[in-house]
Image (cartoon, grey):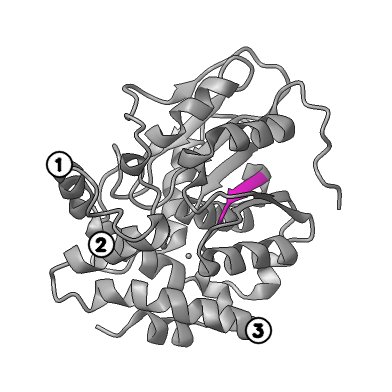
Amino acid sequence: MSNFAARQSRAGVVGQCSSTEHLSGFAPANGDLRRRAPYTGAKPLLFIHGSLASKHMWAPYVEVFAPSRRTLAVDLYGYGDAAPWSHERPLRLADEVALIRTAISDLGAPVDVVAHSFGAVVALRLALQHPQSVDSLTLIEPVSFNILRHLGPQAAEARAEITPIAESFNAAGGDLSFALVRFVDYWNGKGSFAGLAADKRATLLARAGQVARDFEAVFGERLPLAAYRRLPHSTLVVTGSASPSAALVASKAVARLAPRGWSITIDGAGHMLPFTHAPSLKAILLERLGASSNVARRAA
Protein backbone atom coordinates (compact mmCIF):
# COMPACT_ATOMS: atom_id res chain seq x y z
CA MET A 1 0.00 0.00 0.00
CA SER A 2 1.33 3.43 -0.91
CA ASN A 3 2.29 5.81 1.86
CA PHE A 4 0.19 8.67 3.17
CA ALA A 5 2.31 11.41 1.64
CA ALA A 6 2.11 9.84 -1.80
CA ARG A 7 -1.65 9.50 -1.52
CA GLN A 8 -1.92 13.14 -0.45
CA SER A 9 0.14 14.43 -3.36
CA ARG A 10 -2.06 12.56 -5.82
CA ALA A 11 -5.25 13.67 -4.09
CA GLY A 12 -4.43 17.16 -4.25
CA VAL A 13 -6.76 15.68 9.05
CA VAL A 14 -6.50 11.70 13.29
CA GLY A 15 -6.52 12.22 11.68
CA GLN A 16 -4.01 12.48 13.79
CA CYS A 17 -4.91 13.68 17.01
CA SER A 18 -5.19 11.55 19.83
CA SER A 19 -7.64 12.57 22.38
CA THR A 20 -7.51 9.93 25.02
CA GLU A 21 -9.45 10.16 28.22
CA HIS A 22 -7.14 7.51 29.62
CA LEU A 23 -4.36 10.06 29.98
CA SER A 24 -6.52 12.57 31.76
CA GLY A 25 -7.77 10.53 34.68
CA PHE A 26 -11.35 11.12 33.56
CA ALA A 27 -13.56 8.07 33.90
CA PRO A 28 -16.07 7.81 31.02
CA ALA A 29 -19.62 8.55 32.07
CA ASN A 30 -22.41 6.05 31.60
CA GLY A 31 -25.45 6.58 29.45
CA ASP A 32 -26.35 8.72 26.49
CA LEU A 33 -24.82 12.16 26.33
CA ARG A 34 -27.89 13.66 24.72
CA ARG A 35 -29.51 16.24 26.97
CA ARG A 36 -32.79 17.95 26.23
CA ALA A 37 -33.61 21.32 27.70
CA PRO A 38 -36.55 23.71 27.32
CA TYR A 39 -36.11 25.69 24.12
CA THR A 40 -34.53 29.07 24.90
CA GLY A 41 -33.74 30.22 21.39
CA ALA A 42 -30.18 28.92 21.61
CA LYS A 43 -29.04 26.53 18.91
CA PRO A 44 -28.37 22.87 19.75
CA LEU A 45 -24.79 22.21 20.82
CA LEU A 46 -22.85 19.34 19.20
CA PHE A 47 -19.58 17.91 20.60
CA ILE A 48 -17.22 15.82 18.43
CA HIS A 49 -14.23 13.95 19.90
CA GLY A 50 -10.83 13.22 18.38
CA SER A 51 -8.90 10.01 17.72
CA LEU A 52 -8.61 7.46 20.53
CA ALA A 53 -11.41 9.16 22.46
CA SER A 54 -15.20 8.93 22.56
CA LYS A 55 -18.23 11.10 23.26
CA HIS A 56 -17.66 10.52 26.98
CA MET A 57 -14.71 12.91 26.98
CA TRP A 58 -17.27 15.71 26.75
CA ALA A 59 -19.31 14.71 29.83
CA PRO A 60 -17.94 17.55 32.03
CA TYR A 61 -18.72 20.05 29.27
CA VAL A 62 -22.21 18.70 28.61
CA GLU A 63 -22.95 19.14 32.31
CA VAL A 64 -22.05 22.82 32.06
CA PHE A 65 -24.42 23.52 29.17
CA ALA A 66 -27.22 21.01 29.77
CA PRO A 67 -29.30 23.29 32.02
CA SER A 68 -29.87 25.77 29.20
CA ARG A 69 -28.81 24.15 25.94
CA ARG A 70 -29.89 21.10 24.02
CA THR A 71 -26.64 19.12 23.76
CA LEU A 72 -25.43 16.07 21.89
CA ALA A 73 -22.04 14.32 21.93
CA VAL A 74 -21.43 11.79 19.16
CA ASP A 75 -19.06 8.89 18.56
CA LEU A 76 -17.07 8.68 15.34
CA TYR A 77 -16.40 5.41 13.53
CA GLY A 78 -14.51 2.87 15.60
CA TYR A 79 -14.85 4.67 18.93
CA GLY A 80 -17.26 4.41 21.85
CA ASP A 81 -20.62 3.03 20.78
CA ALA A 82 -20.09 3.61 17.06
CA ALA A 83 -19.61 0.67 14.72
CA PRO A 84 -16.14 0.10 13.28
CA TRP A 85 -15.44 1.13 9.71
CA SER A 86 -16.13 -2.10 7.81
CA HIS A 87 -15.83 -1.13 4.14
CA GLU A 88 -12.88 -2.19 1.99
CA ARG A 89 -12.34 1.34 0.67
CA PRO A 90 -10.54 3.93 2.82
CA LEU A 91 -12.48 5.99 5.32
CA ARG A 92 -13.07 9.58 4.22
CA LEU A 93 -14.13 12.66 6.16
CA ALA A 94 -17.39 12.67 4.21
CA ASP A 95 -18.18 9.26 5.72
CA GLU A 96 -17.83 10.67 9.23
CA VAL A 97 -20.00 13.60 8.19
CA ALA A 98 -22.73 11.22 7.03
CA LEU A 99 -22.60 9.52 10.44
CA ILE A 100 -22.99 12.86 12.21
CA ARG A 101 -25.78 14.01 9.92
CA THR A 102 -27.78 10.96 10.96
CA ALA A 103 -27.18 11.72 14.63
CA ILE A 104 -28.33 15.35 14.36
CA SER A 105 -31.21 14.78 11.96
CA ASP A 106 -33.90 15.23 14.63
CA LEU A 107 -32.49 18.37 16.26
CA GLY A 108 -34.47 20.67 14.03
CA ALA A 109 -32.00 23.56 13.94
CA PRO A 110 -28.42 24.35 12.92
CA VAL A 111 -25.88 23.32 15.54
CA ASP A 112 -23.09 25.12 17.33
CA VAL A 113 -20.18 22.67 17.02
CA VAL A 114 -17.38 22.14 19.53
CA ALA A 115 -14.80 19.66 18.28
CA HIS A 116 -11.27 18.50 19.10
CA SER A 117 -8.41 17.34 16.91
CA PHE A 118 -9.58 14.81 14.30
CA GLY A 119 -13.14 15.65 15.30
CA ALA A 120 -12.44 19.29 14.47
CA VAL A 121 -11.38 18.30 10.96
CA VAL A 122 -14.62 16.36 10.61
CA ALA A 123 -16.52 19.41 11.86
CA LEU A 124 -14.89 21.56 9.17
CA ARG A 125 -15.99 19.10 6.51
CA LEU A 126 -19.52 19.09 7.95
CA ALA A 127 -19.67 22.89 7.80
CA LEU A 128 -18.32 23.03 4.25
CA GLN A 129 -20.41 20.18 2.92
CA HIS A 130 -23.65 21.08 4.73
CA PRO A 131 -23.38 24.75 5.74
CA GLN A 132 -27.07 24.95 6.55
CA SER A 133 -26.57 22.35 9.33
CA VAL A 134 -24.05 24.46 11.25
CA ASP A 135 -24.42 27.80 13.04
CA SER A 136 -20.89 28.20 14.44
CA LEU A 137 -17.63 26.30 14.84
CA THR A 138 -15.37 26.14 17.89
CA LEU A 139 -12.41 24.02 16.84
CA ILE A 140 -9.81 22.86 19.34
CA GLU A 141 -6.60 22.32 17.38
CA PRO A 142 -8.04 20.97 14.11
CA VAL A 143 -5.40 18.65 12.67
CA SER A 144 -5.94 19.73 9.07
CA PHE A 145 -2.64 18.33 7.89
CA ASN A 146 -4.08 18.01 4.39
CA ILE A 147 -3.68 21.77 3.84
CA LEU A 148 -0.04 21.98 4.93
CA ARG A 149 1.34 21.17 1.50
CA HIS A 150 -0.34 24.29 0.10
CA LEU A 151 1.34 26.64 2.57
CA GLY A 152 4.88 27.99 3.13
CA PRO A 153 8.20 26.75 4.56
CA GLN A 154 6.96 26.59 8.16
CA ALA A 155 4.08 24.39 7.02
CA ALA A 156 6.51 22.18 5.11
CA GLU A 157 8.48 21.66 8.32
CA ALA A 158 5.28 20.82 10.19
CA ARG A 159 4.26 18.35 7.49
CA ALA A 160 7.69 16.71 7.68
CA GLU A 161 7.17 16.36 11.43
CA ILE A 162 3.75 14.68 11.31
CA THR A 163 4.11 12.57 8.14
CA PRO A 164 6.42 9.96 9.74
CA ILE A 165 3.91 9.53 12.58
CA ALA A 166 1.18 8.80 10.05
CA GLU A 167 3.33 6.60 7.88
CA SER A 168 4.41 4.48 10.83
CA PHE A 169 0.89 3.00 10.86
CA ASN A 170 1.23 2.14 7.20
CA ALA A 171 4.68 0.59 7.60
CA ALA A 172 3.93 -1.45 10.70
CA GLY A 173 3.35 -4.68 8.76
CA GLY A 174 0.27 -5.55 10.77
CA ASP A 175 1.86 -4.78 14.16
CA LEU A 176 0.57 -1.34 15.09
CA SER A 177 1.98 -1.23 18.60
CA PHE A 178 5.12 0.74 17.66
CA ALA A 179 3.06 3.21 15.63
CA LEU A 180 0.59 3.73 18.45
CA VAL A 181 3.29 4.30 21.05
CA ARG A 182 4.85 6.91 18.78
CA PHE A 183 1.46 8.51 18.21
CA VAL A 184 0.47 8.73 21.88
CA ASP A 185 3.87 10.03 22.93
CA TYR A 186 3.85 12.65 20.17
CA TRP A 187 0.64 14.19 21.43
CA ASN A 188 1.07 13.63 25.17
CA GLY A 189 4.83 13.67 25.77
CA LYS A 190 7.60 11.10 25.66
CA GLY A 191 6.94 8.08 27.86
CA SER A 192 3.19 8.73 28.14
CA PHE A 193 2.17 5.38 26.68
CA ALA A 194 4.60 3.42 28.84
CA GLY A 195 3.25 5.21 31.90
CA LEU A 196 -0.27 3.93 31.40
CA ALA A 197 -1.68 0.93 33.24
CA ALA A 198 -1.61 -2.33 31.28
CA ASP A 199 -5.37 -2.39 30.74
CA LYS A 200 -5.31 1.17 29.39
CA ARG A 201 -2.53 0.31 26.97
CA ALA A 202 -4.52 -2.69 25.75
CA THR A 203 -7.61 -0.54 25.21
CA LEU A 204 -5.66 1.95 23.12
CA LEU A 205 -3.94 -0.78 21.12
CA ALA A 206 -7.34 -2.19 20.21
CA ARG A 207 -8.14 1.16 18.56
CA ALA A 208 -4.86 1.54 16.68
CA GLY A 209 -6.35 0.43 13.37
CA GLN A 210 -8.91 3.20 13.58
CA VAL A 211 -6.18 5.77 14.18
CA ALA A 212 -4.60 4.63 10.92
CA ARG A 213 -7.95 5.13 9.17
CA ASP A 214 -8.29 8.59 10.73
CA PHE A 215 -4.93 9.55 9.27
CA GLU A 216 -6.02 8.25 5.87
CA ALA A 217 -9.17 10.35 6.05
CA VAL A 218 -7.22 13.52 6.83
CA PHE A 219 -4.52 13.09 4.22
CA GLY A 220 -7.10 11.90 1.70
CA GLU A 221 -9.15 15.11 1.97
CA ARG A 222 -9.40 16.74 -1.46
CA LEU A 223 -10.88 20.14 -0.62
CA PRO A 224 -8.76 23.04 -1.97
CA LEU A 225 -7.78 26.04 0.12
CA ALA A 226 -10.42 28.06 -1.72
CA ALA A 227 -13.11 26.00 -0.01
CA TYR A 228 -11.93 27.08 3.44
CA ARG A 229 -11.94 30.70 2.29
CA ARG A 230 -15.66 30.34 1.58
CA LEU A 231 -16.51 29.02 5.04
CA PRO A 232 -19.52 31.15 6.05
CA HIS A 233 -19.58 30.42 9.79
CA SER A 234 -18.10 32.15 12.79
CA THR A 235 -15.04 29.99 13.48
CA LEU A 236 -13.06 30.13 16.71
CA VAL A 237 -9.86 28.06 16.81
CA VAL A 238 -8.52 27.26 20.27
CA THR A 239 -4.87 26.25 20.62
CA GLY A 240 -2.40 25.46 23.39
CA SER A 241 0.88 27.33 23.51
CA ALA A 242 2.82 24.11 24.19
CA SER A 243 1.27 21.99 21.43
CA PRO A 244 3.37 20.25 18.75
CA SER A 245 4.16 22.50 15.81
CA ALA A 246 2.20 20.42 13.30
CA ALA A 247 -1.01 21.01 15.24
CA LEU A 248 -0.28 24.72 15.75
CA VAL A 249 0.59 25.44 12.13
CA ALA A 250 -2.49 23.60 10.84
CA SER A 251 -4.79 25.20 13.41
CA LYS A 252 -3.59 28.74 12.82
CA ALA A 253 -3.89 28.23 9.07
CA VAL A 254 -7.54 27.30 9.48
CA ALA A 255 -8.15 30.42 11.57
CA ARG A 256 -6.50 32.59 8.89
CA LEU A 257 -8.30 30.98 5.97
CA ALA A 258 -11.82 31.18 7.42
CA PRO A 259 -13.32 34.60 6.56
CA ARG A 260 -14.87 34.81 10.02
CA GLY A 261 -12.07 32.95 11.75
CA TRP A 262 -10.14 33.96 14.85
CA SER A 263 -8.09 32.20 17.49
CA ILE A 264 -7.43 32.01 21.21
CA THR A 265 -4.34 30.42 22.79
CA ILE A 266 -4.38 28.85 26.26
CA ASP A 267 -0.99 29.49 27.83
CA GLY A 268 0.88 26.37 28.91
CA ALA A 269 -1.64 23.97 27.35
CA GLY A 270 -0.85 21.21 24.89
CA HIS A 271 -2.93 19.37 22.32
CA MET A 272 -4.85 17.50 25.01
CA LEU A 273 -6.14 20.72 26.53
CA PRO A 274 -9.79 19.58 26.79
CA PHE A 275 -8.50 17.17 29.47
CA THR A 276 -5.60 19.07 31.01
CA HIS A 277 -7.01 22.61 30.93
CA ALA A 278 -10.74 22.01 31.27
CA PRO A 279 -11.49 25.09 33.42
CA SER A 280 -9.89 27.40 30.85
CA LEU A 281 -11.69 25.77 27.96
CA LYS A 282 -15.02 25.80 29.79
CA ALA A 283 -14.63 29.52 30.40
CA ILE A 284 -13.99 30.13 26.70
CA LEU A 285 -16.95 28.02 25.67
CA LEU A 286 -19.30 29.64 28.17
CA GLU A 287 -18.28 33.11 27.04
CA ARG A 288 -18.81 32.18 23.41
CA LEU A 289 -21.77 29.80 23.59
CA GLY A 290 -23.42 30.21 26.98
CA ALA A 291 -27.15 30.92 26.76
CA SER A 292 -26.77 34.25 28.54
CA SER A 293 -23.51 35.24 26.86
CA ASN A 294 -23.14 38.82 25.68
CA VAL A 295 -20.03 38.00 23.69
CA ALA A 296 -20.71 38.62 20.04
CA ARG A 297 -19.57 36.04 17.55
CA ARG A 298 -17.12 37.55 15.17
CA ALA A 299 -18.98 39.22 12.36
CA ALA A 300 -18.03 38.92 8.73
Q: In this orientation, which residue lies closer to the viewer: 182 or 118?
A: 182
Q: Earlier in the sequence, mark 1 or mark 2?
A: 2
Q: Which amino acid is tagged 2?
A: Val
Examine the structure image and report whether residue 140 is included in the region drawn in magenta.
yes
Q: Position of residue 172 (x, y in %)?
A: 19, 75
The span shown in magenta is 137-141
Residue 157's image quarter?
bottom right
- Residue in the image at 49% along x and 44% along y: 101
Residue corresponding to mark 2: 181
Lower sequence index among marks 2 and 3: 3
Q: Nearer the viewer, residue 159 or 81?
A: 159
Judged from the image, the secondary structure of the residue bearing numbered disc 1 is: helix
x and y, in percent, of residue 154 in the image = 62, 80
- Mark 1 vs mark 3: which is more N-terminal? 3
Q: In this rendered view, identify the residue nearer to me: 42 or 282.
A: 282
Q: Which residue is mark 1?
A: 199
Report the residue at 55% width, 49% height from top: 269
Asked whether residue 131 is in view, the answer is: yes
In the image, residue 11 sits, relative to residue 49, either above or below, namely: below
Q: Amino acid at mark 1?
A: Asp
* Residue 39 sits inside the magenta stretch: no
Give the distance between the C-alpha atoms of the residues marked 1 and 2, in whole angstroms: 15 Å
Please state which amino acid type lies under the numbered disc 3.
Gly
Disc 1 versus disc 3: nearer the observer: 1
